[in-house]
Image (cartoon, rainbow, N blue to C red):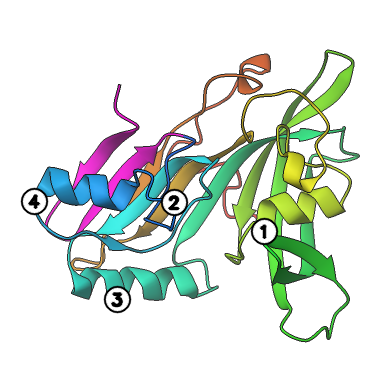
Amino acid sequence: MSPYDVLYRDRELIVANKAPGLLSQSDRSGDPDLLTLLSRETGRPVFPVHRLDRGVGGLIVAAANQRAAAKLSQFVAGEDGTFKKEYIAVLHGFFDGEYGTLTDCLLREGGRTRVVPEGTKDAKIARLAYRVLGKTETDGKTLSLVAVRLFTGRTHQIRAQFANAGHPVAGDGRYGAHDRFPGIALFSSRLSFPHPATGKTLCFSAIPDGTPFDRFSIPDPGEKGFFDDRD
C-alpha cells in the first residue's frame, strides 16, 4: 500500500494525501520521504512548498518546478489568507463554546515549541481559529473533534498552542497527551490557494480515518471549509 495518494498533478504542482509516519522531505534518518518518492514517480525534481510533521497525515502541496515553488512559498509565507490551511484534530477535554481563537508567542528550542511571554527573544506570534465539530467520552477520557484554521505556520503550532490551552492533541505524548492512542490525531484536511501560473483558486479536501478519529462522524470540509471565512 502506497504511503501517499496523488490527488492532483500538472506542470506546476502536485497535491498529495500523505500517510502519517511518512516524512514530508528527507532528513538525517534516511527514511523514505514524500518529495523523494514523488521525484522518482515523475522522473523530475519536486520542490518543497510547506511541510507536515512526520506523525501528521493529510494534504500537502509540492511544486513541479522552481518558479512554481517560489510563487507557492510566497503564498504560504503570507498571512493574508491567500493560502488557506485547515486541519481536523482530536483534542483532550471539552470546550466552552463552538468557536474560538488562540494567539500566542511561540519559541522553538531543543526540538520542542513552547508558549512564552510576549517579547521573548526569537519568539514568533502564532494565531489559529478553531471550531468544535463533536465531542465524546471514551475509555474514561473526554475528547473533542475540532477543525482548525491556521493563520500562521509555526513548527508544531497546533500541537503546542492547544497543549498550552489544556487540550493536547490525542496521541501526542511530546506535548502532554497521556493516552494510548496510536499516532498524533491531527490531519491536514483542506487546502485552498491560487494556481501559481493561472491564478485560479484550487481547493482540495480529505477526511481522516483510524483511531481515535473513528470515535466521531466527520463531515467533509468541501469547497467552503469549516469556517465559511468567518474568521
Q: Residue furthest left?
A: 43
Residue 43, labelled with which disc?
4
Measured Cα–Cα span from mark 3 to mark 4: 21 Å
Q: CA distance from mark 1 to mark 2?
A: 23 Å
Residue situated in front as seen by the camera: 150 or 96 = 150
Q: Which mark is residue 157?
A: 1
Real-space Cα separation, disc 4 to disc 2, in angstroms? 23 Å
Q: Earlier in the sequence, mark 1 or mark 2?
A: 2
Using the numbered discs, state the Cα–Cα distance from disc 3 to disc 1 in whole angstroms: 23 Å
> Within 10 angstroms of label 2, few (less than 14), some, or many (20 or more) residues?
few
Residue linked to disc 3: 70
- In which image quadrant can residue 138 be found? top right
Magenta stretch contains residue 228:
no
Q: Is residue 66 above or below residue 11?
A: below
Front tag of 4 and 1? 4
Sequence-earlier tag: 4 or 2: 2
Residue 158: % across, % down:
68, 52
Q: Which residue is mark 2?
A: 29
